[in-house]
Structures are given as structure tokens and as C-alpha cells.
Image (cartoon, rainbow, N blue to C red):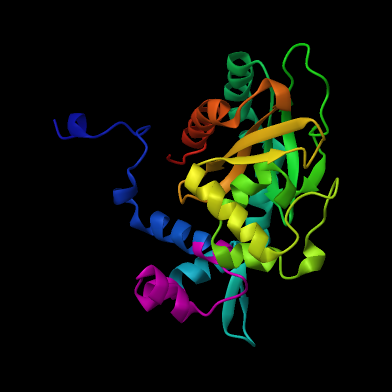
Amino acid sequence: MAEASRAPESTPPRSSQVPAAAQVLAILRYLARQAGPVPAAAIARDLGLPRSTTYHLLTTLTDAGFVVHLPEERRYALGVSAYELGTGYTRQAPLQRLARVPLAALVDRVGQSAHLAVLHGREVIYVIEERAPGRPPLVTDVGVRLPAQLTASGRAMLAALPAPAVRALFPDAAAFVRRHDLGPTTYAELRRLLSDTGRAGYATEDGEVTPGFASVATAVRDHAGHPVAAIAVTYPVAEGDPATLAPQVRRTAAEISRRVGGTR
């Protein structure tokens, strides 16, 4: 009878049943957010872990290559195995796979071309372009990079970042690349633009990437609220209205956020 009451072996354990696994993931996420290596005491303090547990888990992660110990500095950083996980994610392209169907549905609803972009430093990289039937090709083709502060996609993601992170990306006037002599040229101008984006709930650009075309975009967020990508619709200025398109773009971004494990 006791055997019959056991859960099937294939049943995945709940996180509450494997606290060590949750603690390991917390350490890895914490290290990934840091600007540089950190001491074990800071990890224990910020995560609320016992120091003995922290050292034990760090030793295990170091042995497996996910963490590297810098003995001279008495600090810890992510190791090569963590990098291999990241490159595996890139090879498998799960974000593109999860986003493609919702993006195509968005194009069907609005009749305009749409794309998915990710932030890379001060640039956006376009990873999907879904062109509406009969619409001309855009500069936002897959693999193209553009200055983030000029694009609706970039502005949507920048507006979702903490102000210090944005400031670090745009430390001086040299960071502000322009196209068609448009767009912000100072950090103060950029902050005002991003504040407007935050209040509106979506980002826009009008002729700053391609004359005669405008875009509206919303960030895709992960479980921590971090912008992992942005969805944008691009349209001829005479054929669209950002306030009308924004709800459709936000709906798609929310769906993709749910698919990647985030919440909206």
C-alpha cells in the first residue's frame, strides 16, 4: 500500500522540494546582473543565504565551471560553463521561435510590416522581420543594426531599463549617432523622450530611421521585468496612427512575454 501512494517517478519536483536548486539559480542570476566579480559575503547578504550554504554552493558551481573563483581578489564571477549555456540559447534561437507566430498574427491584424529586435549595447539588432503583403522592404531586415535611441524598438527597451544603465550606455555626446539629422543628441533629451515613452506605454519614431515611415513599439519583458526584446510595427506615415496601432503591438508583446516566462 505504501508503494501505491508514491508519486510517479516522472513527476517533476516542485521548487519547494528542491531549495538547493532554487538557491543555485538565484546565485547564477545574481552574478549575471553584476558589473564585475563579487565577494561571497555580498552574495550571501543580498540573497539572504547562510554564509556556509553560499560557500558550499559556490564550491559546487566552481567545480562544474559555472562560477570562477578569483583568489587574489576573493571574489566570484560567472564561469565558462555559464557562457556555454548562453551560446546554446543563441544556437537554439528560442526567442525567435516563440515570437514568430504572434508576430505573424500581428501583421495579419494591422496590415503593416512588423519586426522583433533585441538590444546590444547602444544598438538594436533585428532578428525577425515579418513583411505584410504588398509592403515595400524596410531597412529593418534580419541582422541589421541601428542606433537604439533612434528606433522605436530601441526606445521601448531603453525606457524599460534603470536610468543608471541608460546613462552608462550614453555617457557623452559621442554616443549619439544620428540618421537624417534627427533624434536626440544629449542624455537629457534622451531621458525626456524615454520618460514620455514610459508614460505612454509604447515608443514611437517618425522618419528618424527612414523618411516617410514611422514605427510604434513595445518591450518584451522576462520574469524580472527586464526588456529582452521589442516588437514594432512600421508603416507609411500617411497610413497609420501610433495611438491606434499601439494596443495591437502591446497585445503581441504581452503574448510573447508570457511565452518567454515573463509577465505583463
Which residue occupies the extreme top position in the image?
134
Question: In the rendered image, which quarter is residue 94 located in?
Answer: top right
Q: Is residue 243 magenta?
A: no
Which residue occupies the extreme bottom position in the image?
72
Q: Nearer the viewer, residue 52 or 31?
A: 31
Residue 28: where, in percent of width, then height? 52, 61
Q: Decide if residue 116 is on the left or right side of residue 18.
A: right
Q: Across the whole image, how many numbered discs are drawn on residues?
A: 0
Which residues, given as a range, are shown in magenta? 30-55
The quarter of the image holding the C terminus is: top left
Q: Decide if residue 178 is on the left or right side of residue 121.
A: right
Q: Is residue 67 visible?
A: no
Q: Nearer the viewer, residue 150 or 22?
A: 150
Q: Is residue 33 magenta?
A: yes
Q: Is residue 207 visible?
A: yes
Q: Is residue 150 above or below residue 231?
A: below
Residue 55: where, in percent of width, then height? 45, 75
Q: Is residue 189 above or below residue 206?
A: below
Residue 81: where, in percent of width, then height? 65, 57
The quarter of the image holding the N terminus is: top left
Residue 123: where, in percent of width, then height? 75, 51
Q: Is residue 72 above or below residue 57?
A: below
Q: Decide if residue 180 is on the left or right side of residue 92.
A: right
Prevailing SS of the magenta stretch: helix
Which residue occupies the extreme left position in the image?
1
Which residue occupies the extreme right position in the image?
180
Identify the residue at image location x=82%, y=66%.
174
Q: Nearer the viewer, residue 20 or 94?
A: 94
